[in-house]
Image (spheres, rainbow, N blue to C red):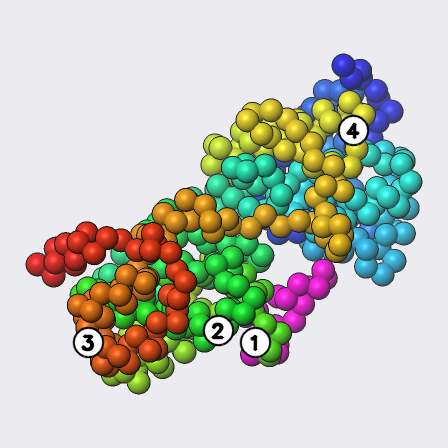
Amino acid sequence: MATKNTTKRLAVLASGGPAPGINSVISAVTIEAINLGWEVYGVHDGYRGLVEDDLERLTLHDVSWIHFRGGAVLGMSRTNPAQGDNMERIVETLQRHNIDLLVTIGGDDTAFGASVIADKMGGKLRCAHVPKTIDNDLPLPPGVPTFGYTTARSVGVSMVQNLIVDAQTTGRWYLVVSMGRQAGHLALGIGKAAGAHITLIPEEFGPDEASIDRFAKILEGAVIKGRAHGRNWGVAVLAEGLIEVLKPSELERFPDAGRDAFGHIRLANINLGSILSDIVSHGLKERGIDTKFREIKLGYELRCADPVPFDIEYTRDLGYGAVKFLADGGSNAMVVLEENRRQFVPFEKMRDPDTGRTIVRNVDVSAESYLVARRYMQRLTRKDLDDRDDVERLAQAANCTPDEFVAEFGPLVEGEPDAFAWEDEVRDELADEEKS
């Protein structure tokens, strides 16, 4: 059992983008460290604070009632610790303040930065990382979410539910672009729980399948399918990570997007929903169909929401676990909870051995949870095109012949499992009820 050691000095920082629950981690880390007799220093604005020596001593008074608040009381930034002379300045700051323990709160880039700093310090700094991202894409055990995801999904679902009612009321389509740079967990979680008409995520597209035109054609098919059942409105949820799976030639459509300090495309600068709205509406107009579209971006509205009770409890456990790990002599690992037990994943096991970057946890499109999501989407399926009556109804809604419809939309469903579709009799009964 660890004993109190007043010589220990711990620094805590949050880096990257905000996520609900950060303040709860800061609070738990500070309280437990002070309980052990350590001094605690809060680093302002993530790694920027270490680069520019911007630290403050934290007390129990500073953190006792911040756990239920959104945002991050210490501030955050996307400063890259490995850029320029940042690493040398970080080492100088840590040495100047005699910091021997570091808790980082963040995503894959933050974890990678912490591991590089620990290596640079040559064993004189022990680190623990608390995984944070509303994207839910860090390599945690199956079924274990990253903190902040549950709150972000809850807020996103509420917003999409409102948009569904608005779409029905005004007879329009909303294209909702959700955060999720490399994985579609948040988009799928919001779309599935809210009952959005269709959700598109990057994991469903192979290397030769992803293109702006294919995304647009899938959405156009969903609009037509709705019209065939008497519905001229809807909501589509799109993961912003769809941009990341495009071929380099496709990215030429976004020459002004720019990149951040870590080399990632600035997805916030790309109006994916607007681009797709224009393409889909143009295609529909050529069929004589006038449909109103509007892009809505979800992300910044979700990141600083007050955490739901699940995330508050979860982050308190994680904050305590990080300090306990360091108190027991641990270093260079990510703190996770699995079946309510504290576990630690070494930094090296989080990295791809070839690239050195943090492994991304993607949506498993072979899992039953994804199957359920697809079955409840208003999306063209193989069964739609296998049944002659269905094809004729869809072709009529698209103002074309059945053969033309199959030729144009058939490639979208080639190789698709039959299980993605509702049974014909259930679908037809629902359509009849809506028309009556």
State if disc 3 and disc 4 touch (CB < 8 Å): no
Question: Label 3's element?
Answer: helix
Task: From the image, tell me which residue sits under label 1.
Answer: 250
Residue 186 placement (x, y as % from top left): 48, 50
Task: From the image, tell me which residue sits under label 4.
Answer: 330
**Circle 2: is it few (<14), some (14-19), or many (20+) Cα within 10 Å?**
some
Spatial distance from mark 2 to mark 1, Cα to Cα?
7 Å
State if disc 2 and disc 4 touch (CB < 8 Å): no
Task: From the image, tell me which residue sits under label 3.
Answer: 396
- Closer to the chain start, of discs 1 and 4, is 1
Would you identify the image quadrant in which residue 233 lies? bottom left
Spatial distance from mark 4 to mark 3, Cα to Cα?
66 Å
Asked if residue 9 lies left or right of residue 370, the reply is right
Give the residue displayed 90% in from the left and 35% down from the top.
124
Residue interval drawn in magenta = 253-270
Q: Nearer the viewer, residue 229 or 383?
A: 383
Task: From the image, tell me which residue sits under label 2.
Answer: 212
Q: Residue pushed farthest left?
A: 436
Spatial distance from mark 2 to mark 3, Cα to Cα?
26 Å
